[in-house]
């Protein structure tokens, strides 16, 4: 039986869940997280409940972070990064930079849960992000809802009357070479629409999409309730450009109106870009350090079996919170098998 | 009832590294020290740190105090620290109360004077509340390293292997004559080039040959009862005498059912379903032939008439469209409402298919079918052809039309939910524990779910779920013991009217009704010997401490050890 | 007659309301000092008796913070307490308490803003409504 301790690189939901599961199995771990807080991308998501819970899992992330802090078996190192790794097969020596100091940690298993970045909407200049104040990303909307509780226009702080959600921003896009679906954006945008309309029923929302992607067992009822909501329009057409005038609140766009097939122009006072996930900027560097293969898109592929290196979560490819947690649990099982079982 | 003179309360003030200084000035400390029954009032800059808690522990060894109040941040912070540092204090951890004067007072009430008044009120009340505290012990129960897996599908197989490889003995039960399930129908994976049949056979062989796995086929479930560490499944046997198999935990992998629609025109031989498509691609030569020997040139996949929010059909359609085009030179159409590409690598496959000439047609109104000279004419309006409110209807004369089989909950789900006493929601799939715990487990401690019995999902996702559920089982069994605080509900059998309200209302199936009571509220005496009355009993390993039974019981026979009604009344000012 | 500072008793379920209450301060928002928080393991722990006891002992208003529907750790604790509230509303009507004095609010652990808003709204409503009929 090997010495049992794990080094987890990345303290997002996948890393935190692996640490929790290993702790329950009596295996200690250290989480190395570069930011000052755990939770990664999902740690700042807002609750998207409407008249009932919409299963967005945002609160689950908060709860997991609190839970992991209760475990004596888990050491949490924030504001720390991985320098290099040597050794192999159950006897790893990792160099960690933490608060300006360098330290060496021993580990019998190495788990990579470095996650993803969100797409930088400025790379789609035709949408005017960063130019028009009232074009925001889903990330900005999460922040707004989490800290203020309600949605407002950045330009004047007023409550918007018409909000447009643009799907597939940074995903399924040949022009930037992103040939993948980020899986979560259709569901999160629909949830945003439900929660916004629940808080402000007078707001009209429109959802511009290519194909609606399902997510999880609760998606069917979510989609049903959206289809029945008269304040929500689901439009199978993606406008290619947003037009605005300097600091005006209103934004214009052209799209094909599906029932008639005609090109129409409409004004909205808030546009939310449903940004997708991309491999992290330093994904390549970590892959080199740890000799993990990367696929064409830049996400990680499987490390060799029995190498003692494991991957979990969105660093393997876009994933929602629920699937990341299930994946993390499955990874914990593989780790405990690798370390000799219980 | 003990006199309040007997209580000796220690107060520990957490200054939270100076952040509570405006609130916790000398006047406040004097006030606290002067409250009734307070034997001492210590301060620390950071009580929840290891050093702070060490000091707290040593202060309590003197035996001066028999209960303690922490004045500082949220109780959740201290509970966290106690747990994290595995704190053994001379005082039982349930003899502590926390006065939250930081998050809910200092940080939320911006007028310092008002905040101080509030803090004083909360501290005084918390100190008074300590009179209701009583020590709560810890119990442990042995958990043998054995588990039951119900369902012999590939998910059950994978779960059994995952458990066995972690040194857990598994009994795998299946109703069928052999293990395997639907996965045998797949010819190709959508995401890797490996051959499914050999992979599948390898999994089956591994399970059958594994020293830690015992496979029981043709096993019909008659009853399931027990609790974590001691679940017992009774199988139907000849002459009503079934075998009883035991496990510490139960993992359900009972799958889902499919309902193909073969009514009317759909019964025609040109309509096939995915399993037949898979079989054709596995066995067919370079040019595919139907059962009458006619060469198949045009294949149309119809999606989203059923299973609209499930990804499986889309993935298989794109995968097979590519194979039909590349290996068999067919003309292929995929007709759908929305193409589901939310699987790893699917978007690229979809583009590849389009580049190879597979035609994707999207509809709003469902396609219509008619028979034309031995072929099926599929008529569908393509949404992108709409102009001036009219749409162009495409007519596809197909040699073969691949329809979807509707995925429905397994017909066994009702029986399983009933036998296991777990809820079955309206949709008919077995219910996970609430989202705060995430999928793969049921709300009864020790019961886990994976795969299609929860919801139909693509093979790779179902396999990950199988391993995740196995990890849930592994955790509970990992120490060979389950330790828990007796901070649970407790029923006084002498007051129980056996109305079964608590039994029905308990969300975690933690209550059973057994003959164990010495007396009963209806009894007028006259019963002798070792006769025991039936009464409700809370299984302490299964109880989550929610207290729903406590408030539901009409005779107030149930108490929640760590939050009694008396405590609540005091907080309300009664 | 306007009430000076309405006393609000908030029953907070440990899995949602209590954590949301803790979050309020972190967001820089505020809570009235006449708010009293009672921590319970689940909203289902709250009996009709407790709600009435709160009103009986001087609360001008009672708020119950429970998990969102379909997000209760005990599956239906939030629905059970809602049903009990229906019963209490009936009693309140008979004894002359306005319905606004008892309300259910669904929150998640990260709904600090919603918690603060709900409390503030109830506070303002109760100021308008006046003190409890018992006073």
Image: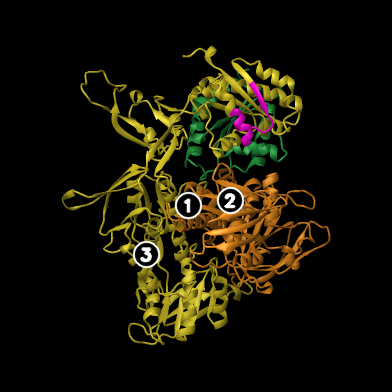
Q: Are marks 2 and 1 on the same chain?
A: no
| Vertical placement of residue A266 versus C126, above or below | below
Q: Are marks 2 and 1 in contact (CB under 8 Å)?
A: no
Crowd band around label 2 with a 10 angstrom C-alpha radius: few (<14), some (14–19), many (20+)? many
Display colour for chain C:
green
Examine the structure image and report whether residue C123 is included in the region drawn in magenta.
no
Magenta segment boundaries in residue numbering: B41-56
Residue C39 at x, y = what percent? 56, 31
Badge 1 is on which residue?
A: B439
Residue A58 at x, y = what percent? 59, 49
Chain under callout 1: B
Secondary structure beneath label 1: loop
Residue C135 at x, y = what percent? 63, 17
Chain under callout 3: B
Residue sitting nearer the eye, B127 or A223? B127
Badge 2 is on which residue?
A: A30
Q: Nearer the viewer, mark 2 or mark 3?
A: 2
Crowd band around label 1 with a 10 angstrom C-alpha radius: few (<14), some (14–19), many (20+)? many
Chain under callout 2: A
Badge 3 is on which residue?
A: B259
Residue found at x 54% / y 69%: B339
Residue B161 in view: yes
> Count the marks: how many?
3
Q: Are marks 2 and 3 on the same chain?
A: no
């Amino acid at each position: 039986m090997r010495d049992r301790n794990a080094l987890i690189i990345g303290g997002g939901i996948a890393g935190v869940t692996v640490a929790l599961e290993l702790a329950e199995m009596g295996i200690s771990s250290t989480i190395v997280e570069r930011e000052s807080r755990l939770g990664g991308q999902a740690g700042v998501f807002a609750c998207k409940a409407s008249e009932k819970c919409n299963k967005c899992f945002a609160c689950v992330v908060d709860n997991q972070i609190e839970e992991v802090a209760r475990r004596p078996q888990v050491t949490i190192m924030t504001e720390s990064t991985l320098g290099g790794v040597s050794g192999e097969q159950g006897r790893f020596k990792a160099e960690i930079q933490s608060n300006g100091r360098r330290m060496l940690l021993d580990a019998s298993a190495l788990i990579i849960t470095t996650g993803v970045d969100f797409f930088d909407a400025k790379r789609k200049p035709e949408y005017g992000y960063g130019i028009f104040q009232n074009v925001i990303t889903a990330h900005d909307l999460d922040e707004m809802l989490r800290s203020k509780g309600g949605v407002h226009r950045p330009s004047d702080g007023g409550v918007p009357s018409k909000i447009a959600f643009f799907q597939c921003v940074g995903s399924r896009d040949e022009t930037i070479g992103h040939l993948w679906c980020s899986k979560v954006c259709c569901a999160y945008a629909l949830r945003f629409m439900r929660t916004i309309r629940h808080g402000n029923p007078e707001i009209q929302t429109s959802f511009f999409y290519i194909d609606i992607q399902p997510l999880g067992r609760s998606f069917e009822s979510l989609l049903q309730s959206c289809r029945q909501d008269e304040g929500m329009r689901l439009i199978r057409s993606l406008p290619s450009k947003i037009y605005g005038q300097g600091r005006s609140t209103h934004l214009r766009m052209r799209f094909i109106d599906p029932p008639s097939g005609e090109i129409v122009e409409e004004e909205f006072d808030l546009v939310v870009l449903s940004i997708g996930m991309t491999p992290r900027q330093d994904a390549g560097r970590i892959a080199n350090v740890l000799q993990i293969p990367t696929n064409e898109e830049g996400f990680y592929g499987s490390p060799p079996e029995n190498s003692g290196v494991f991957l979990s979560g969105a660093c393997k490819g876009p994933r929602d919170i629920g699937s990341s947690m299930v994946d993390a649990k499955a990874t914990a099982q593989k780790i405990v098998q690798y370390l000799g079982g219980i | 009832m003990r006199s309040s003179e007997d209580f000796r309360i220690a107060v520990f003030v957490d200054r939270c590294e100076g952040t509570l200084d405006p609130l916790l000035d000398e006047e406040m400390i004097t006030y606290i020290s002067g409250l009734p029954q307070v034997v001492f009032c210590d301060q620390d800059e950071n009580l929840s740190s290891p050093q702070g808690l060490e000091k707290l522990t040593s202060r309590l060894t003197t035996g001066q105090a028999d209960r303690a109040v922490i004045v500082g941040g949220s109780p959740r912070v201290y509970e966290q620290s106690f747990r994290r540092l595995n704190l053994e204090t001379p005082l039982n951890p349930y003899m502590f109360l926390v006065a939250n004067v930081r998050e809910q007072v200092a940080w939320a009430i911006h007028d310092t004077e008002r905040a101080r008044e509030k803090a004083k009120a909360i501290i005084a009340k918390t100190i008074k509340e300590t009179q209701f505290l009583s020590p709560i012990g810890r119990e442990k129960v042995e958990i043998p390293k054995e588990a039951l897996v119900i369902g012999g599908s590939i998910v059950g197989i994978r779960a059994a292997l995952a458990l066995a490889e972690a040194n857990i003995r598994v009994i795998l039960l299946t109703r069928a004559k052999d293990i395997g399930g639907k996965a045998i129908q797949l010819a190709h994976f959508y995401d890797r080039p490996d051959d499914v049949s050999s992979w599948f056979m390898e999994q089956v062989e591994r399970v059958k040959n594994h020293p830690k796995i015992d496979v029981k086929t043709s096993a019909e479930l008659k009853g399931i009862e027990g609790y974590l560490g001691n679940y017992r499944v009774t199988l139907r046997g000849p002459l009503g005498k079934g075998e009883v198999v035991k496990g510490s935990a139960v993992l359900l992998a009972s799958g889902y059912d499919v309902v193909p629609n073969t009514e009317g025109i759909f019964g025609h031989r040109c309509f096939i379903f995915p399993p037949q498509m898979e079989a054709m691609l596995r066995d067919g030569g370079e040019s595919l032939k139907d059962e009458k020997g006619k060469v198949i040139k045009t294949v149309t996949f119809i999606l989203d008439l059923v299973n609209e929010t499930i990804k499986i059909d889309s993935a298989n359609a794109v995968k097979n469209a590519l194979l039909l085009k590349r290996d068999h030179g067919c003309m292929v159409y995929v007709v759908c409402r929305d193409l589901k590409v939310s699987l790893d690598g699917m978007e690229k496959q979809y583009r590849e298919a389009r580049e190879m000439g597979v035609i994707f047609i999207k509809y709003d109104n469902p396609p219509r079918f008619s028979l034309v000279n031995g072929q099926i004419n599929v008529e569908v309006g393509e949404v992108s052809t709409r102009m001036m409110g009219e749409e162009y209807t495409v007519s596809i004369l197909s040699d073969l039309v691949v329809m979807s089989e509707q995925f429905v909950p397994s017909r066994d789900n009702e029986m399983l939910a009933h036998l296991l006493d777990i809820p079955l929601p309206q949709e008919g799939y077995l219910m996970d524990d609430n989202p705060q715990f995430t999928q793969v487990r049921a709300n009864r401690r020790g019961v886990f779910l994976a795969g299609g019995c929860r919801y139909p999902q693509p093979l790779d996702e179902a396999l990950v779920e199988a391993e995740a559920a196995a990890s849930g089982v592994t955790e509970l069994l990992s120490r060979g013991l389950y330790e828990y605080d007796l901070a649970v509900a407790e029923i006084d059998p002498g007051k129980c009217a056996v109305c079964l309200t608590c039994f029905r209302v308990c969300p975690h199936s933690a209550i059973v009704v057994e003959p164990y009571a010495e007396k009963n509220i209806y009894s007028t005496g006259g019963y002798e010997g070792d006769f025991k009355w039936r009464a409700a009993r809370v299984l302490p390993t299964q109880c989550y401490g929610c207290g729903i039974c406590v408030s539901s019981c009409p005779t107030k026979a149930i108490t929640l050890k760590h939050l009694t009604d008396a405590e609540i009344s005091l907080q309300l000012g009664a | 007659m306007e009430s000076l500072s309405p006393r609000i008793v908030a029953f907070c379920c440990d899995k949602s309301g209590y954590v949301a209450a803790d979050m309020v301060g972190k967001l820089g928002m505020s809570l009235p000092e006449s708010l009293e928080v009672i921590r319970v393991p689940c909203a289902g722990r709250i009996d009709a008796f407790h709600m009435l006891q709160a009103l009986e002992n001087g609360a001008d208003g009672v708020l119950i913070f429970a998990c969102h529907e379909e997000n209760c750790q005990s599956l239906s604790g939030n629905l059970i307490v809602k049903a009990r509230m229906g019963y209490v509303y009936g009693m309140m009507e008979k004894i002359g308490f306005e319905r606004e004095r008892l309300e259910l609010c669904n929150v998640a652990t990260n709904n600090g803003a919603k918690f603060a808003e709900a409390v503030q709204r109830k506070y303002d409503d109760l100021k308008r409504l006046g003190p409890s009929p018992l006073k």
